[in-house]
Image: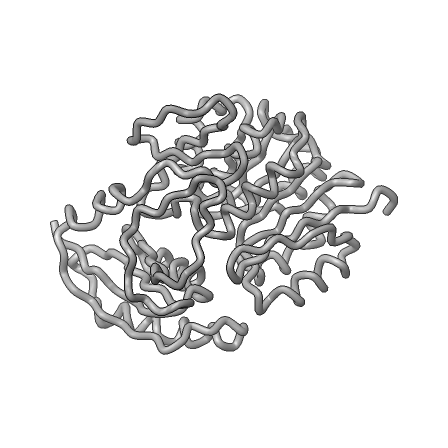
Amino acid sequence: MKWYELTISTTEEAQEMISNFLHELGAGGVSIEESGSLNKPRDTSLGQWYELPLNDIPEGEAIIKGYFTEDVDADALIEALKPRIEELREFDIDPGKVEYAAVLVDDEDWATAWKQYFKPIRVSETLTIKPTWEEYEAAPEERIIELDPGMAFGTGTHPTTALCLQTLESVVRGGEDVIDVGTGSGILAIGACRLGAKRVLALDLDPVAVSSATENVRLNGLSDQVEVKLSDLLGVLKQDEAGAESGQTAVELPVDLVVANILAEIILLFVDDVFAALKPGGIYIASGVYENKETDVEAGLLASGFEVLEKRRDEKWIAFVARKPQVV
């Protein structure tokens, strides 16, 4: 079988939104390659290693590839994408000088080739992400997250995900009830459990994400601790207000911790909902914030009543650590 490989040259800042556009248009898979130049700083303090070869993508830029069945009209796809990508500028997301290309490729050229570059990687002091197909002997102190992201989700090495996992490691004390909003592959829900959280409710509006997260939770033997649900946070809050039964493994609202690794624009839409979902003293980790949205997100958190405890940075991405005051 052949597939159309639609290549978009853009910026790292716009890659999350453009990837989402490709999924919405029916992509069977999406891959992202960021700058790999010799000038790019690489953190090896936790033993990270970088299997992808260096490339000549300029700093701050990215190449996104979406894969579509050969019966689609590739030109029509590009024309559908152009206005949506240009519209990002109105939201202060700069896609740069966007370039498009489409070619036919064989499925074996992309469906599994990416796996050769996904190796076990230490992302925090104790957490290591391990692809399910790789053999790996963990050190005694390591907590392993088994992951098969498929072509629909990242491998957990993106700065926003790494920031979330590192921040979870610093705030989870053990026994917490946690909500993971926009769970994707389920990596943060699994990481929270590995760090000692009691129960996690993993939410996503994408059925593909729910399926992927459910499988990864099963692969990690955590099906009795993590409930994966097709919902947003507001839907869960409304259900709780209605007194509905929430299931055997669901968390009890309000919870100790909420983590969300999504775009700043989405974070700002439900800050009040997160505040309502947390116990007094509860912690909110909000990641996926590009540096140009830092002020907006901080203002939104403060306006909803949060105390901003810390801002963690990796490259141009930021993770906020906020707390609901003990007395509201």
Does residue 208 appear in this view? no
39 vs 322, nearest the viewer: 39
Q: Residue at x 14, y 56 (%)?
A: 105
Does residue 284 appear in this view? yes
Quadrant in which residue 231 is drawn: top right
Give left or right: position of 306 versus 38.
Answer: right
Q: Considering only vertical position in the picture, is 315 above or below 283?
A: below
Q: Considering only vertical position in the picture, is 318 above or below 51?
A: below
Q: Residue at x 44, y 58 (%)?
A: 41
Q: Residue at x 26, y 65 (%)?
A: 7
Q: Residue at x 76, y 38 (%)?
A: 279
Query: In x, y percent, where is residue 308?
Result: 74, 54
The total number of labels drawn is 0
Q: Considering only vertical position in the picture, is 244 above or below 153?
A: above
63 vs 27, nearest the viewer: 63
Query: In x, y percent, where is residue 110?
Result: 21, 50
Quadrant in which residue 291 is drawn: bottom right
- Give the image's coloring scheme: one colour
Query: In x, y percent, where is residue 71?
Result: 16, 59
Give left or right: position of 130 versus 124.
Answer: left
Q: Residue furthest right?
A: 327
Give left or right: position of 328 versus 27.
Answer: right
104 vs 133, nearest the viewer: 133
Give left or right: position of 101 versus 298.
Answer: left
Query: In x, y percent, where is residue 276?
Result: 74, 46
